[in-house]
Amino acid sequence: MKRSKIVTVHIIATCIAVMTISCFFSFSLLAEILGNEVFIKQVKTAILYCLPILLICMPVLALSGKKLAGNSKSSIVAKKLKRMKLVAINGVILISLAIYLYYHAIFKTIDTTFLLIQILELLFGAINLGLIGLNIQAGLKLSGRMKKRRI
């Protein structure tokens, strides 16, 4: 596959991942702020049903990123790859939390335990968005679309 096609796949996967995680985060936060139990259940159900989007998108993102990185010795590339490992670990935690929150919201009660786990999910989601944002910034620097800052 040509490099330009890999770049396109990487950018599309990045956009889908960021939009999906942002929606999960935003709707979860909104549901908690509103405190409407029906809405909370709807959000948790929607997140569970949309998880396959991330389960497809994130490996595509990682594989295309590794393919683009090749044997690069760039410190920017090394940092991107390290952050992606953290994103993957966080992703596994987030998937577990999403399944737990869905189960708890639908089959149990929305109680203090649910709220504490929800806070954890929001925290890990914010961390993942931050890490992905740093990788986007690094990718823009690598492509020349963003100037490297000199300190």
Image (spheres, rainbow, N blue to C red):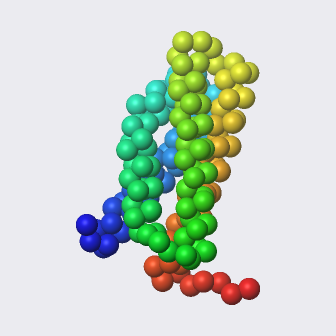
State the residue lying farthest toward the left: 1
* 123 relative to 49, above or below: below
Residue 10 place in picture, x, y as percent: 39, 62
State the residue lying farthest toward the bottom: 150
Image quarter in which the C terminus is found: bottom right
Camera-nearest residue between 74 and 44: 74
Q: Residue at x 52, y 41 (%)?
A: 24
Q: Residue at x 37, y 44 (%)?
A: 56
Q: Classify residue 92 as left or right of residue 3.
A: right
Which of the 4 quarters of the picture holds residue 108?
top right
Which of the 4 quarters of the picture holds residue 4?
bottom left
Q: Looking at the image, can residue 121 be seen?
A: yes
Image quarter in which the N terminus is found: bottom left
Q: Residue at x 60, y 58 (%)?
A: 83
State the residue lying farthest toward the front: 71
Camera-nearest residue between 88 and 118: 88
Q: Looking at the image, can residue 137 be seen?
A: no
Residue 18 place in picture, x, y as percent: 48, 54
Residue 77 place in picture, x, y as percent: 54, 70
Q: Classify residue 83 as left or right of residue 142.
A: right
Residue 120 place in picture, x, y as percent: 69, 36
